Image: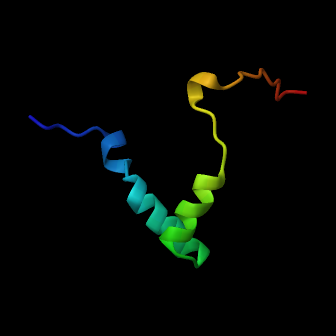
């Protein structure tokens, strides 16, 4: 039936996100893509889980 959840309506494509970031930063989408390519981001399955107690 094609029922959309609230999360579906809030989802944007990578391309659209890049365009929005570029506009907000006063730069081009190409510069955003180049900067992102330079970052070394590990996939979530390789992340280290750290327990932080925020009550201290």
Residue at left 63%, top 34%?
A: 42
Where residue 13 sits: x, y (%)? 37, 53
Q: Residue furthest right?
A: 56
**In the rendered image, the vertical position of residue 53 relative to residue 41, given as above or below:** above
| Of the pair 53 and 37, the residue shown nearer to us | 37
| Of the pair 54 and 40, the residue shown nearer to us | 40
| Of the pair 51 and 32, the residue shown nearer to us | 32
Residue at left 56%, top 69%?
A: 31
**In the rendered image, the vertical position of residue 49 relative to residue 36, given as above or below:** above
Q: Residue furthest left?
A: 1
Q: Indicate the quadrant where residue 32 lies.
A: bottom right
**In the rendered image, the vertical position of residue 42 relative to residue 39, given as above or below:** above
| Left or right of 47, for residue 53 | right
Q: Residue furthest bottom?
A: 26
| Left or right of 25, for residue 5 | left
Residue at left 71%, top 21%?
A: 49
């Amino acid at each position: 039936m094609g029922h959309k959840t609230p999360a579906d309506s809030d989802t944007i494509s990578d391309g659209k996100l890049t365009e929005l970031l570029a506009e907000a930063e006063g730069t081009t989408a190409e510069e955003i893509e180049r900067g992102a390519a330079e970052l070394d981001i590990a996939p979530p399955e390789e992340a280290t889980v750290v327990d932080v107690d925020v009550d201290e």
